[in-house]
Structure formats: structure tokens, C-alpha cells
């Protein structure tokens, strides 16, 4: 299972990458995509939506089930990955790359640091 | 948790194992559900269905007993033939759906859903009290695999000592499969040609290996579910339940006009709702339990199964809807995460051209 060291993680299986300035990119982990199986539909938030950490902001549907995706940090949604509309399977093929879900800007101080590091995320999987 | 005789094969093949009806079963292998689904539609897939229950009914009264206990008419079966059938309860609902094979003049083999093994055995046993026939649970004697797809016969023909064209749909035959005694049944749950292959539990591993080596691809319960749904077949616990009147569904053809257990309750009931196929117009996937609404957003029913068809890429499913909305072409709305999404009532199957 791939869990890159440079990312931060939420226990609910989202990853967060800090981009330029205060913008972060969010996706789901390799572990999460593997558990879901074939992703067939991704419902993404509206650009401009204000979210709080823990809000349900997206839904990923696999063949078997629909799973909520939570905002790992607060802020405003500044971009969504529209390419997933035509190719939702990208979430399986490239969970940390082209399979990203959305970007959030303006998270509060300390929110990102409060997320898990790779080792912490892997430990949280053992607790499940 | 129970395991089928093929458990080790699944683990060795890298299957994602899940609990199903008290068994540890493969949900899918490395290729995933979609790929397995498409393999069955285009080539040949191999399913372990050894968890399914088998019961044998024997005795001079076996035929009239099963004619009374089930909705279809096993008495119409020629020797070696099988039929789809259902077991009614006393309130007009369904205890399980079944396949019934006539093994002899007074001998039948029933294949039932794993989850309903005790319910079926208990009900048939009680109903057979005082009758000159015996109901015996023989589940543990049998392993069962399903070889399904347009290439199923090609995979099988080099391995068996007989001409497969002699086995018509719903017929069975005894054969040697690479030296292993098996019963071949030209049946399945995918909407494709194929065979269900009964062997003794101890021979299951070699049957599996031989069929995989001959080119069939292991497929799990995930693809089994999407295939049956696309083909328009019901799944017990979804389309059929203890409170489902089959006369209000597209499976009413199973019910024959004869004396059977619970007939009055079933026959006299009004169908306020009907079970229909739906195809989404808006982009959303219907799931079991989602509510169905009419134009005025009044609740008119509920989804029983749904998926995105791996073959057509359309979202399809089954749903109960008020009877006046059950005609194909009628527009209904499925409530998906609080929003009404448009759908059309359609006649299954969902994949045929």
C-alpha cells in the first residue's frame, strides 16, 4: 500500500497536499481506493462552497456502494477535478496524482499540522 | 464463519474476501468487479457458488409434495431437467427462490440461497410431516462452481467425455471432467450461456484448477450481482422477500395456477405497487432503500437493487412503484442524497440490444 511521506492524512482516508500558498489538494488514499474497488462515479462539490473540516463534500461510488468524502480542513473549494466525470476510474489508477478530488484554500492555522503523518495514518488503519 | 472447499484457491488468487451468508467468499479477484463482469459477457468466468444450499427430496409423494410446496410445477419436469422456482410462505410472500432439478421419478434436488438454508430446510421439513417423502440437507456433500459466458462451452468441451450440444438449457448430464465425476447443468445466473458444475467437495479444487487452466477467469460475488442485475434476475433479500407477492413482479410467470401453500393470501392480494426495472436519466446510481417519487415529489416506492451497468455504463435497478406508475416509459424520480434524480420505468433485462 502506497502512503507517501510528504502528504498529510485524515483518519477518514483523505490525503492533503499543500500546494502554493494556502491552497491544498485533497484526494483519497491508495488504501481507500483499494477498499472501495472499481470507482464508477464521483460527485464533487461546487467551486466556491465554504466547508468546515469534517463536512461531507463529495461522494465516491464504487460498483457496490456510495461512500462519503469529508473535507479534511476548512476553507473554500477553489477547484474540482472535472476529468473524473468522464474517467472516475482515475481514482483507482492514480489516487495521489490525476485522481485528486478538489482543492481548498484558506484553512485555519494549525489545521493541516493537526492531520496525521504517513506513519500516523498507517497506525490508524491497524486500529480499524 | 464457514469456508467452501475452494477457500484456499481464492486466497491464493489474491481475492478480496468478504462475509456472505455466514461464508467467507470472494467479492472479486485482482482484476476487479467491472473487468470480471465484462469477461463473463465476452468470454468465460468461473464462480465458486459452493455456499449455496442443496436439499434432496425423495419418496413416493415427492412430486405432489413439491407441487404443493412450491409455486412452479416440478411435476412438469422431465428427468434430468431443472426449473426456476420459489417457495411461498403462508402469507403470500417468498421464503426463497430456488432451482429444482428432477433427478429421478421420485427424487428432486433443490438448490437454495445460502442465507436461507435453515429456513428452507425447516419449512420443507415441517410441510413434509405426514407425507411419504423425505427432505434431506445435502449441502455439505456438494461443491458447486458456475462456468458462465459465451465461451463457456468452448472451455468445457475439451475437458469432458461428452458432446455438450446434447445438454440443452435447463438440462443436466453426468460426465467425467478430466477424470473427475461431475454433474453438468446448463443453467446460471448471469444471462449468458453456461454450466453449473456439481462435484464432490474433495474434487472441487481439481475441477477449479482444470477450468482456470482451460481459460476461464475467476469471478467473485460482486460480478455475480452486477451480472444478475443487468440480466434482470431477482436476488433474494432485495427483489424477493417474505412480504413480496411474486404476482406483483415480472416473475409472476413462475406462479402456476394450481393448489399451493399460501395460495389464497397470494392470489387474492391487490398489487398496490409493482416491481419494475428503472433506468436513470439523470446521472446517479440507484441503491437499495432509496425512495422513489412521482412528479409531485410524493413517495411512490423504493429501490430494491441498483448499479451502474458495467456493460452499458447506464445506471439501472429494480424498484417498487405505485401500480399506476409501473408502465414502461413512465418517468419517476429516485431520491439520491436528498435530491430527486429522473429515471424511466423500463422492462428488464437491462443489457440486451
Image (spheres, rainbow, N blue to C red):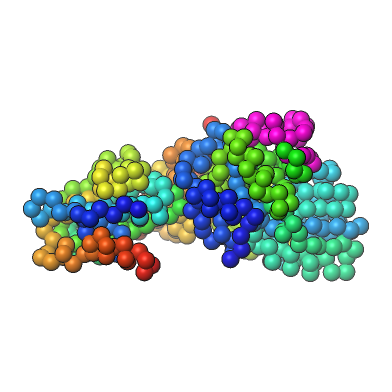
B319 horizontally vs B73: left or right? left
Residue at screen point 84% across, 44% down? B79
Looking at the image, can residue B249 be seen?
A: no
Q: Nearer the viewer, residue B298 or B289?
A: B289
Q: Nearer the viewer, residue A106 or B218?
A: B218
Tell me the residue at 62%/52% (across/down).
B6
Magenta stretch: give its range.
B149-177
Instruction: Please check the rendered image and state whether residue A75 is part of the magenta-colored stretch, yes or no.
Output: no
Who's the residue at 60% across and 40% down the image? Answer: B212
Residue B297 in view here:
yes
Question: In the figure, is residue A30 to the left or right of A45?
Answer: right
Is B159 part of what is drawn in magenta? yes
The furthest residue to the left: A21
Which one is nearer the viewer's eye here, B299 or B141? B141
Q: x and y percent of residue B157 in the render?
A: 70, 31
Q: Position of residue A1 (x, y in %)?
A: 35, 53
Q: Position of residue B187 (x, y in %)?
A: 69, 42
* In the displayed structure image, the side of residue B301 where residue B125 appears, left or right: right
Q: Residue at x 26, y 43 (%)?
A: A98
Q: Is residue B327 above or below residue B21?
A: above
Amino acid at each position: 500500500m502506497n502512503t507517501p511521506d510528504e502528504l498529510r492524512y485524515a483518519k477518514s482516508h483523505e490525503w492533503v497536499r499543500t500546494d502554493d500558498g494556502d491552497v491544498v489538494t485533497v484526494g483519497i488514499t491508495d488504501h481507500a481506493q483499494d477498499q472501495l474497488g472499481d470507482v464508477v462515479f464521483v460527485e464533487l462539490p461546487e467551486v466556491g462552497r465554504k466547508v468546515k473540516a469534517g463536512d461531507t463534500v463529495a461522494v465516491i461510488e464504487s460498483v457496490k456502494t456510495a461512500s462519503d468524502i469529508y473535507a479534511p480542513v476548512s476553507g473554500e473549494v477553489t477547484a474540482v477535478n472535472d476529468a473524473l466525470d468522464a474517467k472516475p476510474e482515475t481514482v483507482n489508477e492514480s489516487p495521489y496524482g490525476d485522481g485528486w478530488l478538489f482543492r481548498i484554500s484558506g484553512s485555519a492555522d494549525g489545521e493541516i499540522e493537526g492531520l496525521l503523518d504517513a506513519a500516523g495514518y498507517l497506525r490508524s488503519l491497524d486500529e480499524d | 464463519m464457514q469456508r467452501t472447499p475452494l477457500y484456499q484457491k481464492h486466497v491464493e488468487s489474491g481475492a478480496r474476501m468478504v462475509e456472505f451468508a455466514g461464508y467467507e467468499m470472494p467479492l472479486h479477484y485482482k482484476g476487479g468487479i467491472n473487468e470480471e463482469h465484462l469477461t463473463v459477457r465476452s468470454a468465460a468466468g468461473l464462480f465458486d457458488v459452493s455456499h449455496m444450499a442443496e436439499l434432496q427430496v425423495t419418496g413416493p409423494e415427492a412430486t405432489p409434495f413439491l407441487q404443493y410446496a412450491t409455486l412452479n410445477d416440478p411435476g412438469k419436469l422431465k428427468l434430468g431437467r431443472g426449473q426456476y422456482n420459489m417457495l411461498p410462505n403462508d402469507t403470500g410472500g417468498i421464503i426463497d427462490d430456488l432451482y429444482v432439478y428432477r433427478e429421478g421419478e421420485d427424487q428432486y434436488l433443490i438448490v437454495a440461497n445460502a442465507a436461507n438454508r435453515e429456513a428452507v430446510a425447516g419449512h420443507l421439513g415441517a410441510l413434509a410431516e405426514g407425507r411419504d417423502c423425505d427432505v434431506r440437507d445435502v449441502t455439505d456433500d456438494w461443491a458447486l462452481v458456475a462456468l458462465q459466458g459465451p465461451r463457456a462451452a468452448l472451455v468445457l468441451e475439451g475437458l469432458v467425455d461428452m458432446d455438450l450440444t446434447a445438454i440443452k438449457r435447463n438440462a443436466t448430464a453426468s460426465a467425467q471432467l478430466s477424470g473427475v465425476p461431475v454433474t453438468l447443468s446448463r443453467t446460471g445466473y448471469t444471462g449468458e450461456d453456461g454450466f453449473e458444475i456439481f462435484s464432490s467437495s474433495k474434487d472441487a479444487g481439481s475441477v477449479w484448477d482444470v477450468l482456470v487452466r482451460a481459460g476461464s477467469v475467476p469471478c467473485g460475488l460482486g460480478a455475480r450481482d452486477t451480472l444478475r442485475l443487468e440480466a434482470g434476475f431477482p436476488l433474494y433479500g432485495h427483489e424477493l422477500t417474505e412480504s413480496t407477492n411474486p404476482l406483483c413482479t415480472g416473475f409472476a410467470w413462475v406462479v402456476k395456477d394450481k393448489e399451493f401453500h399460501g395460495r389464497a393470501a397470494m392470489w387474492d392480494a391487490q398489487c398496490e405497487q409493482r416491481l419494475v426495472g428503472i433506468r436513470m436519466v439523470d446521472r446517479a446510481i440507484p441503491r437499495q432503500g432509496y425512495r422513489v417519487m412521482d412528479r409531485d415529489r410524493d413517495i411512490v416506492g423504493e429501490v430494491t437493487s441498483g448499479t451502474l451497468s458495467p456493460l452499458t455504463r447506464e445506471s439501472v435497478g429494480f424498484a417498487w412503484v405505485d401500480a399506476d406508475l409501473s408502465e414502461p416509459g413512465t418517468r419517476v424520480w429516485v431520491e439520491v442524497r436528498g435530491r430527486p434524480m429522473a429515471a424511466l420505468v423500463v422492462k428488464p433485462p437491462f443489457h440486451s440490444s
